[in-house]
Image: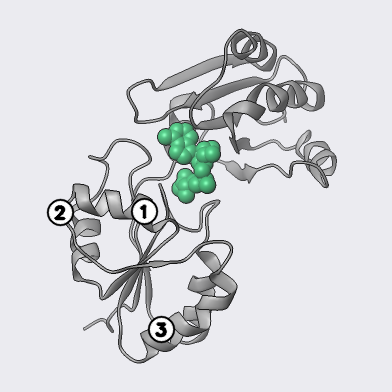
């Protein structure tokens, strides 16, 4: 028999509330408490599925301080789940530090498979998905130039998270560093009513998004440099 799991990492929908697994719902019902990035957002989600469970804040600003206490509770026999506002915890979200601390404390950790924004964006793009690099959010100031320069010769498909008001600036910079003819895809509002997957060269994408006020959540997928 497998030893019991003490920390479950539970992915939650990135928009469409049907995108949650039966196992995720069962685990959320069974654990002793749920660590949540934003207890209000996760509270609404749990309410939607009819789950009543104690939510404990666990976010970027307190995770350093709370990890020891959580590990102590798990060592004493408690079982908990970690959720983020949307998608998979630890993917551009808090999580990895807690996972690492639990592994070091020899507690069993289990990550359930489930929603994350970059996989549907990668697959929708039609760009080679056999090898890719997930870059998450680029640094805003310090380190941005260095990162973009290093990525200019990256031959694998590249995936970035970006906010809507920085989209045009990011696409313009990608065109400067990678060449304006480089093929890319911008996925906006994945799984939601107004999902959009805009495909074309970086130059075409800049022209497309320059014309309007960009809203919603964004993933940018860019073809790698020609080998
Ligand atoms: N943990 C999440 C995951 O597994 O994808 C990512 C969290 S990160 C703080 C939030 C970013 O994910 C957004 O700024 C956007 O880049 C991307 N994202 C989340 N939901 C999305 C959606 N429905 N459509 C497009 N991008 C999304």
Disc 1 designates what residue?
Answer: 40
Label 2 environment density (alpha carbons within 10 Å; few <14, some 14–19, many ≥20): few
Assess disc 3: are there few (<14), some (14-19) or many (≥20) residues with their C-alpha within 10 Å of its C-alpha: many
Mark 2 vs mark 3, CA separation in Å:
29 Å
Instruction: Give residue 19's position: percent from left, percent from top.
Output: 27, 42
**How is the model colour-coded?**
one colour
Q: Residue at x 57, y 11 (%)?
A: 212
Q: Specify whether tag 1 is near ligand 1 (CB below 8 Å).
A: no
Q: Which residue corresponds to mark 3?
A: 107
The first of marks 2 and 3 along the sequence is: 2
Q: Which mark is residue 50?
A: 2
Q: Is residue 158 left or right of residue 26?
A: right
Q: Quadrant of residue 17?
A: top left
Query: Dot 1: few (<14), some (14–19), or many (≥20) neighbours within 10 Å?
Result: few
Residue 82, located in which quarter of the rendered image?
A: bottom left
Residue in the image at 50% along x and 58% along y: 90
Which image quarter is the N terminus in? bottom left
Instruction: Give SS at disc 1.
Output: helix
Whole-percent x and y of residue 13? Answer: 33, 44
**Callout 3: CB less than 8 Å from ligand 1:** no
Judge whether residue 223 can be spotted in this image. Answer: no
Where does residue 131 sit, x and y in percent of width and height? 57, 41
Q: Residue furthest bottom?
A: 76
Secondary structure type for disc 3:
loop
> SS for tag 2?
loop
Q: CA distance from mark 2 to mark 1?
A: 15 Å
């Amino acid at each position: 028999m497998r030893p019991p799991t003490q920390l479950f990492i539970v992915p939650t929908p990135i928009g469409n509330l049907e995108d949650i697994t039966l196992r995720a719902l069962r685990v959320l019902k069974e654990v002793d408490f749920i660590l949540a990035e934003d207890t209000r957002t996760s509270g609404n989600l749990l309410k939607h599925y009819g789950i009543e469970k104690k939510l404990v804040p666990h976010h970027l600003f307190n995770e350093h301080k709370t990890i020891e206490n959580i590990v102590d509770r798990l060592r004493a026999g408690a079982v908990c789940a970690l959720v983020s506002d949307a998608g998979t915890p630890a993917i551009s979200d808090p999580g990895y530090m807690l996972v690492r601390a639990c592994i070091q404390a020899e507690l069993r950790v289990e990550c359930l498979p489930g929603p994350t924004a970059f996989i549907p964006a990668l697959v929708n793009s039609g760009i080679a998905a056999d090898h890719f690099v997930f870059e998450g959010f680029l640094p805003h100031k310090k380190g941005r130039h260095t990162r973009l320069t290093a990525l200019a010769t990256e031959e694998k498909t590249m995936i970035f998270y970006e906010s809507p008001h920085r989209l045009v600036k990011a696409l313009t910079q990608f065109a400067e560093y990678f060449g304006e003819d480089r093929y890319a895809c911008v996925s906006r509002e994945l799984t939601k009513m107004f999902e959009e997957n805009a495909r074309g060269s970086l130059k075409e994408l800049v022209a497309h998004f320059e014309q309007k006020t960009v809203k919603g959540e964004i993933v940018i997928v860019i073809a790698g440099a020609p080998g």
